[in-house]
Image (tube, rainbow, N blue to C red):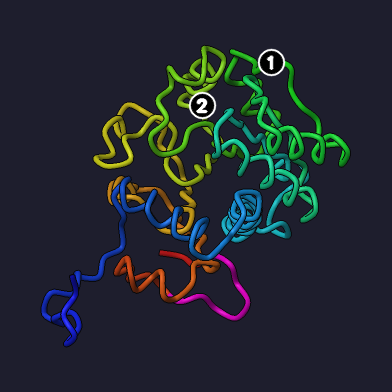
Amino acid sequence: MSSAAGPDPSEAPEERHFLSTAEAAALERELLEDYRFGRQQLVELCGHASAVAVTKAFPLPALSRKQRTVLVVCGPEQNGAVGLVCARHLRVFEYEPTIFYPTRSLDLLHRDLTTQCEKMDIPFLSYLPTEVQLINEAYGLVVDAVLGPGVEPGEVGGPCTRALATLKLLSIPLVSLDIPSGWDAETGSDSEDGLRPDVLVSLAAPKRCAGRFSGRHHFVAGRFVPDDVRRKFALRLPGYTGTDCVAAL
């Protein structure tokens, strides 16, 4: 039981940039259960912010016609749902997304998000070319929304695993959502032999593995996280400018 005098300030947790997998899950539960965010609402907020991060790293006026083409690779778990929303917003922002979604989830949210993308005439690839140069020539950049924290490649099926093997070989810029697919969310293991994204978009707050990220841009997409929740998890993150929903780390 807590004492009437309240917690000892000397025992307050030290502020930090990164969350463990357990802490990230607890933060999400707090948003869903205590603050009554809906799952679709969180996916929408994260997907929109991910698209905004892409526009900041690769601003449209600086891109050639070919560079505006974006391949969004989605898995069947929550990160894939965020990728579908990201693709839709990129289309709204006048980029030219194409989606590769080889292992489709039967979850109603995934199905609804897929329908939205189809209704907006975003093309879906039926297969990912194994010839890496074809992808390099067809697209300006790739968004990795295949695996999220705690999801192993073997859990999402062969097509996703093969897609990740192809993504490792690309020479065009790669943007990973939340964590680079295949990395251990805690230790960042496989950061040397796995995907090496140019841009990382941490959703809500960076996970511990982000400490090993060495790409060009790291954004946090967590403006929607209430101040009380940030304080509870002792998050020390950069401030958001104006109406921005992402901040550079």
Q: Where is residue 210 in the image (x, y as percent from the top left)?
A: 34, 49
Q: Is the magenta stretch mostly helix, strand or loop?
A: loop
- Residue 130 vertical position relative to residue 63 in the rendered view, above or below: above
Q: Disc 2 to disc 1, how far (Cα)?
A: 14 Å
In the image, is residue 210 part of the stretch drawn in magenta? no
Q: What element carries label 1?
A: loop
For residue 127, the mark is 1
Residue at (32%, 45%) from the top-left corner?
Answer: 21
| Quadrant in which residue 1 is drawn | bottom left
Rendering coords of residue 134 (x, y %): 66, 20
Quadrant position of residue 186: top left
Vertical order, 143 against 123 (above or below): below
Name which residue type carries label 2: Leu
For the point 80% across and 53% down, the residue is 92
- Most foreground residue, 232 or 197: 232
Going from the N terminus, do you reach mark 2 or mark 1 first?
Answer: 1
- Residue at the image position 49 percent from the left and 23 percent from the top: 164
Q: In which quarter of the image is residue 45?
A: bottom right
Task: Give the SS element for disc 2.
Answer: helix
Kindly give the residue lying farthest to the bottom in the view shown. 5
Left or right of residue 152: residue 15: left
**241 inside magenta stretch:** yes
x and y, in percent, of residue 169 in the image = 47, 24
Residue segment shown in magenta: 239-246
Q: Mark 2 points at which residue?
A: 167
Of 79 and 218, nearer the camera is: 79
Does 139 sit above or below residue 204?
above
